[in-house]
Image (tube, grey):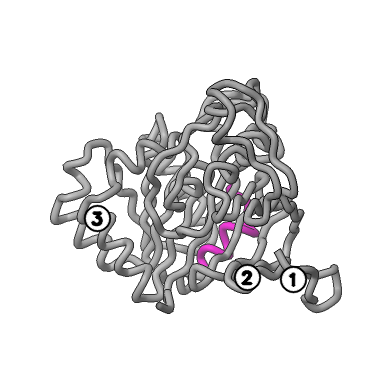
Amino acid sequence: MSVKGTLIPIGGNEDKGIETSEIYHLEYITEGILSRVVKESGGEDAMIIIIPTASSIPDEVGPNYIEAFSKLGCTNLHVMDIREREQSESPENLELMKKADCVMFSGGDQSKITEKIGGTQLHKIMMNRYLNEAFVIAGTSAGAMCMSAEMIKGGGIKEAFTKGATLMGEGMGFIPDLIIDSHFIRRGRFGRLAEAVSKFPKIIGIGLAEDTGLIIKDRNTFEVIGSGMVIVFNARNAMHNNRLQVEEGAPMSLTNLKTHILANGDRLNIENKRVKVSPIGLSVTDAQAL
């Protein structure tokens, strides 16, 4: 089945200054990535809905996204401030979502998105429009991680690659063939994404650095955008994966974990398992199969 919509997961971008409050973690707002979201949505006249559900300070985050999009000439902007699950069933929000060209999920806690929106009529409208229309679903940090079917809910780096350190849950299901992690380089999340793909070895793991995103078309092909890197983990052909044999909390081992490091302009085709790299100034060329 051909999918007509576009997904744009973004890896986040924290600490714009010396402040540590969440208001200063506006997660990716650089004109390069944001302007691409606007372009994919249809341009300055696109109707864009910002959903700050994941954030702990939605009253501040929502208006900041409005300001960021406004700087790019957008005027048809709306904040859908969903704090209770019942709001995902309200006729007003459902009608608004039916008219939108793009929905943008903020960062924060991805579990809040699935708890307040997952499985509701609002979620169903988003999914239906994504599958059947030129509808854009964008999200940064938590808003990117929730896009997958198998979603990373949490897990620190202290336990490194130990069984049970990575918490998994059900995501929004927009992209079933990827597991997405964000702030990947800055926060040292190699171990938790490795455990995620060891648990689901048929799914490709994607680690997004900050100020970096993907343009995913037809649930199959993605292009890297932004200034950072994307780490790709493929455990499909792992020769040794002892996850089922070790106890909770025990160190794990995984061999033949294939890894790719991609940058701006590089592309990956999930179906035919090929990576294409784009050297600066040159056209995209075949690299090697996943």
SS state under label 2: strand
Q: Are marks 1 and 2 in contact (CB under 8 Å)?
A: yes
Picture quadrant of residue 75: bottom left
Tell me which residue sits at (71%, 39%) in the image.
185
Going by the numbered disc 1, the residue's amino acid type is Lys
- Disc 2 marks a residue whose amino acid type is Asn
* Disc on res. 276: 1
Q: Which mark is residue 122?
A: 3
Where is residue 191 shown, x and y percent of the image? 66, 34
Give 76 or 272, whichever is nearer the viewer. Answer: 272
Q: Residue at x 24, y 60 (%)?
A: 96
Pointer 3 or 1: first along the chain: 3
Image quadrant occupied by the N terminus: bottom left
Label 3: state its secondary structure. Answer: helix
Residue 269, numbered circle: 2
SS at circle 1: strand
Residue 228 appears in view? no
